[in-house]
């Protein structure tokens, strides 16, 4: 066990999916895994381990924002030896060709700051996804005929953003979407030589104002989870 994860050694799989919402972790486990067991409920951050087509998988909630995700990913890597970590979550679209319900496969994740910023000091480090995972996710999305986009995203420190000028620059430079966790996930995976990817569903759009009704979110998020699981094991 760790401070934030109550699982025993062996309870956590080498492949971990990371939704921010612990109840989304439960939903994904119930709908995609068999032989499910609850392995963590410390602080209400639910984690489940089960079977996906003969592969052992953990789906662990990671909370909201990079500081919280950093806690869980550090412990998953250092204490449980997780090797493949895939964020599955929602994002806000930033480009006109990106539509609500589309899937974003994040090649890079820009940020103003992350919990790793103090390490890099003056360096503007550019964290990126694992290429084999990214390629496998694109293949999986194509096979499922899921509308998807591949490129850079922006990991923001704040949800209620008061920097429209910064959003304008992100859009100007081709950033596909904004979310709050992926940049630190990529930092940590690169630091510890692990595989990481963020696969996101567009739940709302910053310029059009369109938003996915809560009643339709779970159905739309199913494509993202399926793509993540297929990508994780097509490269093993």
Image (spheres, helix red, strand yellow):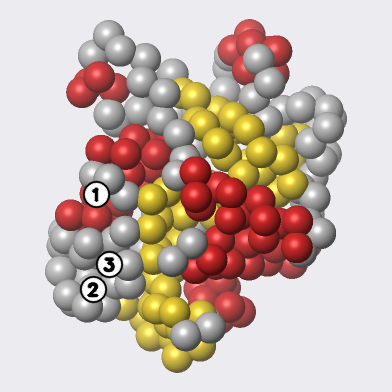
Position of residue 69 measured from the top left corner of the image (x, y, whole percent): 36, 46
Residue with the mark numbered 3: 42
Label 1: which secondary element: helix
Position of residue 228 measured from the top left corner of the image (x, y, whole percent): 56, 61
Residue with the mark numbered 2: 7
Left or right, residue 117 beside residue 210: left
Is 56 or 12 nearer to us in this picture? 56
Position of residue 140 measured from the top left corner of the image (x, y, whole percent): 67, 60
Left or right, residue 169 beside residue 216: left
Mark in the foreground, 1 or 3: 1
Label 2 Cα crowd, 10 Å radius (few <14 / some 14-19 / many 20+): some
- Residue at x 59%, y 12% (from the top left corner): 166
- Residue at x 50%, y 31% (from the top left corner): 109
Label 2: which secondary element: loop
What distance separates the C-alpha of mark 3 from that of mark 2?
9 Å
Label 3: which secondary element: helix
Q: Earlier in the sequence, mark 1 or mark 3?
A: 3
Left or right, residue 230 beside residue 58: right
- Residue at x 17%, y 75% (from the top left corner): 9
Q: Earlier in the sequence, mark 1 or mark 2?
A: 2
What distance separates the C-alpha of mark 1 from that of mark 2?
14 Å
């Amino acid at each position: 066990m760790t401070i934030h994860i109550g699982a025993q050694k062996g309870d956590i799989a080498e492949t971990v999916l990371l939704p921010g919402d612990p109840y989304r972790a439960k939903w994904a486990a119930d709908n995609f895994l068999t032989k499910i067991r609850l392995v963590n409920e410390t602080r209400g951050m639910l984690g489940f381990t089960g079977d996906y087509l003969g592969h052992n998988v953990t789906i662990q909630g990671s909370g909201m924002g990079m500081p919280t995700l950093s806690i869980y990913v550090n412990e998953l890597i250092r204490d449980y030896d997780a090797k493949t970590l895939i964020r599955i979550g929602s994002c806000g679209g930033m480009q006109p060709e990106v539509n609500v319900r589309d899937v974003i496969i994040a090649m890079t994740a820009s940020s103003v700051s992350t919990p790793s910023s103090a390490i890099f000091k003056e360096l503007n480090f550019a964290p990126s996804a694992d290429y084999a995972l990214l390629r496998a996710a694109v293949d999986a999305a194509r096979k499922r005929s899921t509308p998807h986009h591949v490129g850079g995203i922006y990991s923001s420190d704040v949800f209620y953003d008061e920097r429209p000028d910064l959003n304008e620059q992100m859009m100007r430079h081709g950033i596909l979407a904004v979310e709050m966790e992926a940049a630190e996930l990529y930092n940590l995976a690169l630091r510890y030589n692990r595989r990481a990817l963020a696969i996101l569903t567009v739940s709302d759009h910053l310029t059009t104002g369109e938003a996915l009704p809560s009643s339709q979110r779970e159905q739309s998020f199913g494509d993202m989870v399926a793509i993540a699981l297929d990508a994780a094991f097509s490269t093993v």
